[in-house]
Image (cartoon, rainbow, N blue to C red):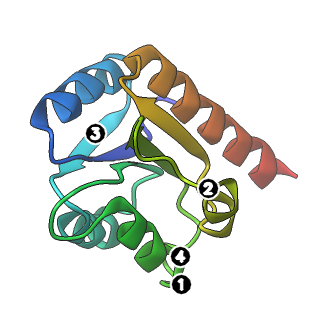
Amino acid sequence: MAGKKILIVDDEIHIVHVVAIKLRNNGYEVISAENGAEAFDLICQEKPDVVVTDLQMPVMTGIELVEKLRSNETTRDIPVITLTARSFSMEKEQQESLQISQCISKPFSPKELLRCVEDILYQQAVTQKS
């Protein structure tokens, strides 16, 4: 799965930094954005294989970003992992309707996030072969 492109979207730069190091050390190309609006522009240009986004951000929230991705034909199938503060939970129905692959609560382990990314990419590869 190495060489795949992952976009990290979070307004907390230390989270972006820690996650980027973990993913790069495992062979992934990492790009980042500080909010949903910046992320959407990058997604349209870069076509990442997976998007990891915080939900609570200025300018455009993670939910608004995912809604915009799902309504755009060229970005609707990009897998999304959301990062949420423990106090901000997402209903299972909303997660399913937005086709969010995984929700991870902060604080989280970069190793846990890496495992989620790898699982999603593995499932994509299996699905594409069938």
**Dot 4: within a 10 Å radius of its alpha carbon, few (fewer than 14), some, or many (20 or more) residues?**
some
Q: Which residue is mark 3?
A: 30
Who is closer to the viewer here, 125 or 59? 59
Measured Cα–Cα span from mark 3 to mark 4: 22 Å
Q: Secondary structure at mark 4?
A: helix
Q: Nearer the viewer, mark 3 or mark 4?
A: 4
Q: Residue at x 33, y 73 (%)?
A: 44
| Amino acid at dot 1 | Glu
Q: Position of residue 84 (x, y in %)?
A: 40, 42
**Dot 2: within a 10 Å radius of its alpha carbon, few (fewer than 14), some, or many (20 or more) residues?**
few
Measured Cα–Cα span from mark 4 to mark 1: 7 Å
- Specify whether 95 is left or right of 83: right
Q: Secondary structure at mark 2?
A: loop
Q: Which residue is mark 2?
A: 91
Residue found at the far front of this picture: 87
- Specify whether 105 is left or right of 17: right
- Residue 73 numbered tag: 1
Q: Earlier in the sequence, mark 1 or mark 3?
A: 3
